[in-house]
Image (cartoon, grey):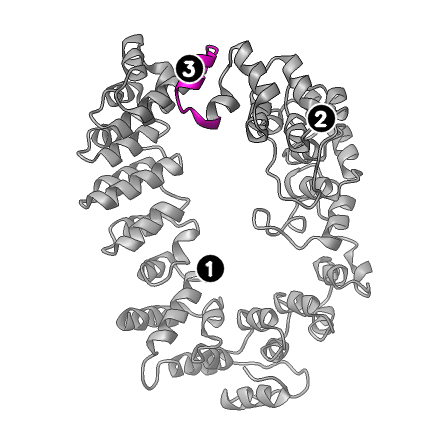
Amino acid sequence: MTGGRDALAELLQRAGLELAGDRRVEEVLPQRGAAWASLFRGPGPSKRLSELWAHGLALNPAVPDELRVGLLGLSHHLLWHPLPTAVVEAAMAHPQWKVRQLLAEAQPNITADQWSRLILGEQDTRHRWILTLLAADRRAQLTDTAYEQLAADPSARIRAEAARLPELPVPLLTVLATDTDPSVRAVVCERAWPQLDSRTRHALLGDADGKVRTEALLSHHQDRPMPREVFDSEDLGDRAVKACPLERDLAEHLARHADRAQRCDLALNPHLDADLVALLAQDSDAGVRSVVALRPDLTEEQRAGIHFDFDPGGHYSPLRWVVALHGDFDAMRRLAASSHPLVRRSVARARRLPADVVEVLARDEDRVVRLFLAESCDDAPADLLVEVWRWWTGSLGFPDRPHSHPNFPRAGLLQYADDPSPRMRRLALDDPQSTAELVERFSRDADEEVRLRAATDPRLSAASAVRLLDDPHERVRNAAARHPRLPARVLVRLLRDTGTAQESARNPLLPARTLRRMIELIQLSA
């Protein structure tokens, strides 16, 4: 849309409405009915306009399930959100392969029976392989019938992916251990070694295929030390150094003479003797010392004695061994006092923590610790949540935290109505005592973020919703286009414009009859 009040006045004039100052723009039911009917007069929507409608409607929570089915194959947005059984079933039977593939890739609500029918219903071998791969990646559960058929599939690629399915029955894994294709046997070695009998293991250790032998050796040495001659005779890569028990002379050789990369790998090995861990903790390379500093078998005193490198601004995943201890409050107390920020950050990711640990972490000098506590812990205190809100706008994994946290305060937020910080100012509208007048005032605020908050408030007047359609910032304009008090005739004009059609199609004001006709027209132009 063009900027300025002239563009706004033109929009209103074309919609047959009048805006006088801040007076509310009202419509009666006959006017709305006439407005919706006018959307379909004249030529139908262009292909581009239809695509934009489809994307908007796919994200519109007001679209009934029986109409949502009609959007399958017309917008990729649809399948990323949890869908009811009827829509999932329709997607499973959809004639377009891309719909069925995206369903398997993205849809959260797929049962074991649906997974099984989806995969087994594919006649194309490549498609069946892709769906089995996605099921394995997503750790999906299938039916017994599906497990049996996939384990016996003519395609070796499918059998290999079947071996990765986490609930594949042991008898089927045992059969796959003797599969004619080496890629399948290699997967079984890694996946099911403890379940194999000694005869099968022996055969895999002497397999003619090098990859199978490698996987068999790595699995064989998960519970028995690996000799140096085995390590030197096979190309076992870094996995042996990282994870296998190593005979003493091999481990000591690597600790003293291996290159930097191998010493870093060795520092991860959970089976390493304590004196070799201590040796690596004094390594000349800071990278090696930094890996040692994150070992779970160190005391916090030992960890504090290591000179490690740590970038406070770097991206780090929570330590798995700390996450595994989240239910152990004594361990959380000990680790919350760690000298290593990543250990403390990993503690802060716990959903529940005792009050004394929360108190310590809420005062941590590392603000990422405080952020993680605000995002993840149900026990995070209100004052911490407000403090983090001042400087954090949300992450992909926790998009609305800390604002959506159950402990985030609501009462008393009116005190921030005149705060110089826009982030704090916008909070005033969350106070139960806030008024429609404050919403109107904030809709004219100098800051984009405050106007955006006003544009999402249901108390915003129709006139102000229309005015914000001409805001200089796209986010505010989009929010205004989705506002449920927007006059229907204005919304119709937005739906006809490719620049505003997608966001306006997300407006919950759209009635079912209009939604149905829009979807029919989208289907005709597809």
Secondary-structure class at tag 3: helix
Residue 335 numbered mark, or none: 2
The three-letter code of the residue at mark 1 reads: Pro
Which percent across, then down, holds residue 292?
65, 25
| Disc with the residue nearer the chain's start (3 vs 2) | 3
Q: Are marks 3 and 1 in contact (CB under 8 Å)?
A: no
Q: Which residue is mark 1?
A: 61
User: Residue at 82% across / 63% down in the picture?
Assistant: 419
Which percent across, then down, holds residue 353?
69, 30
Q: Which residue is mark 3?
A: 230
**As displayed, is residue 339 above or below residue 76?**
above
| Disc with the residue nearer the chain's start (1 vs 2) | 1
Quadrant of the drawing holding the N terminus: bottom right
Separation of residues labelled 1 and 2 (CA atoms): 43 Å
Which percent across, then down, holds residue 433?
75, 60
**As displayed, is residue 186 above or below residue 491?**
above
Quadrant of the drawing holding the C terminus: bottom left
User: Residue at 29% across / 50% down in the picture?
Assistant: 100
Q: Which residues are magenta?
A: 219-238
